Image (cartoon, rainbow, N blue to C red):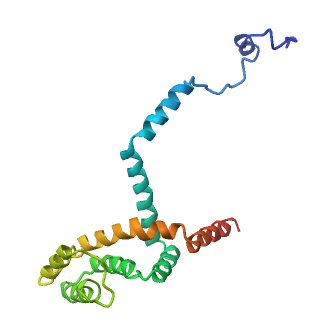
């Protein structure tokens, strides 16, 4: 290869000097166009709120499905005197998996007395209309009779308890511990 000064060589000449070398593809991008596009995406508040809600939803779903996170979340809720929410949500999941119709009736009665009935020992915060709808459905309970209440409690946990838990020391230490266990 002849000695050439880089200041005098042109790139197409350099390309010709090294024909066997693989070159990465380069795409020309307009830096200003990227900035404008990013600003336009940030301006739309509906996208931001959906993305934020979606991330929280996934995190709460993971908390409820993972045993160690669920145990930590339950103890956090217990310290805040609201563990009945997660207990009700789990009871609804178990109720939905009930196969026998006879068991369905007595389990629905038991759940109503434990979580929904006014002055229940572990009463969850649902509005009057949901409570009355569940009470009427107890005559012939179906797998979906607690769905509206479960969704209501889920949204309460998603918007209120879960964000506080994600900033708590209990969650942060559990997260840190799970990262170190992965490396060991």
Position of residue 39 measured from the top left corner of the image (x, y, whole percent): 47, 35
Left or right: where does residue 20 sit relative to residue 53? right
Q: In the image, 19: left or right of 171?
A: right
Q: Position of residue 176 (x, y in %)?
A: 64, 68
- Can see residue 139? yes
Q: Residue at x 50, y 70 (%)?
A: 165
Q: Nearer the viewer, residue 97 or 171?
A: 171
Q: Residue at x 65, y 27 (%)?
A: 24
Q: Quadrant of residue 162?
A: bottom left
Quadrant position of the C terminus in the picture: bottom right
Compare residues 164 and 29 and report the one nearer the observer: 164
* Left or right placement of residue 29 versus residue 74 in this view: right
Left or right for 149, reference 181: left
Image location of residue 141, percent across then percent down: 16, 80
Q: 105 or 38: nearer the eye?
A: 38
Of 54 and 123, nearer the camera is 123
Q: Residue at x 47, y 32 (%)?
A: 37
Q: Which corner quadrant holds the N terminus?
A: top right
Count of labels in the image: 0
Picture quadrant of residue 102: bottom left
**Does 124 appear above or below 11?**
below
């Amino acid at each position: 290869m002849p000695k050439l000064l880089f200041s005098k060589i042109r790139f197409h000449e350099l390309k010709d000097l090294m024909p066997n070398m693989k070159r990465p593809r380069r795409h020309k991008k307009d830096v200003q166009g990227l900035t404008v596009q990013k600003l336009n995406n940030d301006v739309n508040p509906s996208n931001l709120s959906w993305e934020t809600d979606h991330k929280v939803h996934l995190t709460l779903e993971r908390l409820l499905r993972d045993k160690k996170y669920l145990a930590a979340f339950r103890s956090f809720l217990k310290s805040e005197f609201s563990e009945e929410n997660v207990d009700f949500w789990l009871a609804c999941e178990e109720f939905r998996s009930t196969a026998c119709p006879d068991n369905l009736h007595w389990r629905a009665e038991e759940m109503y007395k434990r979580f929904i009935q006014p002055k229940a020992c572990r009463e969850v915060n649902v509005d009057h209309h949901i409570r009355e709808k569940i009470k009427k459905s107890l005559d012939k309970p179906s797998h979906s009779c607690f769905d509206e209440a479960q969704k209501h409690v889920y949204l309460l946990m998603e918007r209120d308890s879960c964000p506080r838990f994600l900033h708590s020391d209990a969650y942060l230490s559990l997260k840190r511990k799970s990262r170190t266990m992965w490396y060991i």
